Image: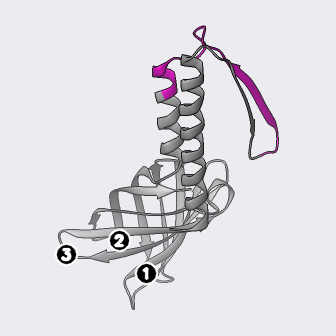
Amino acid sequence: MNGTTQRRILIGLAITLFFGLAANAMERGKSVSMVFETATGTMQAGTARPDGDVDRANRLTTILTAEERAGLRPFKLNAAGGIDLTNGMVQFGGVASHLGLYTGTGFLDLSILSIFGTLEAANGDTLNFVASFSGLIDPITATFTFAGGTGRFVDAVGSASGPVTFNPDFTFLISTRGALDY
């Protein structure tokens, strides 16, 4: 577990603890003031009162959201592309969770049957990957391992696997499922 993941888990636990204590105070008829510092340094303030501003359902939703943000998120990637065997260049595109429409570029290393490359989201954020392949002609499984990138993916880690359909003209289709933390 890397330092970013540990910090996210600790923040999630702190938020969970805070909302639990605040809920108990509100149930006893007391107001609770909250001040949070966001990642950009701005301060968010508010008061939770026992007059209905926050109820158990809202607290649970808030806590689950904080816990979800502290760990791996489901990840799906669908791609169509091709390989240029003269230079090893791989180009593909499609739709992926957390990226939306994306383009992918990489280089095929035939000695280890892996592709090293990046996925680029429409906003320019990139996600680095290594794709390895297993299996014989049919079925072949691709496993993408993600590590770092730019923008929101600078500390990203995760993986996704799924079937690959290769065509005789060196075009392909991939559909993977996995998890990503960023």
**Cα separation between marks 3 and 1:** 18 Å
Disc 1 secondary structure class? loop
Residue 85: mark = 1
- Residue 91 location in percent, x, y? 49, 66
Look at the numbered discs 2 and 1 and tell me whether their residues touch, using CB distance below 8 Å. Answer: yes
Which residue is the site of mark 3?
137
Check the image and report above or below for 126 versus 56. Answer: below
Give, as a single range, the part of the protein colored magenta: 40-59
Q: Return the disc, 3 or 2, that comes first in the chain's sequence.
A: 3
- The amino acid beneath tag 1 is Leu
Residue at 58%, 53% in the rendered image: 10
Residue closest to the eye, 11 or 157: 11
- Residue 126 location in percent, x, y? 61, 60
Q: Residue furthest top?
A: 51
Q: Which dot, 3 or 2, sits closer to the camera?
A: 3
Disc 3 secondary structure class? loop
Which residue is the site of mark 2?
170
How many numbered discs? 3
**Cα separation between marks 3 and 2:** 13 Å
Disc 2 secondary structure class? loop
Check the image and report above or below for 45 versus 170. Answer: above
Look at the numbered discs 3 and 2 and tell me whether their residues touch, using CB distance below 8 Å. Answer: no
- The amino acid beneath tag 3 is Ile
- Residue 177 location in percent, x, y? 34, 55
Residue 63: in magenta span? no
Examine the image and state in which quarter residue 103 appears: bottom right
Residue closest to the eye, 169 or 109: 109
Residue closest to the eye, 145 or 110: 145
Residue at 56%, 56% in the rendered image: 182
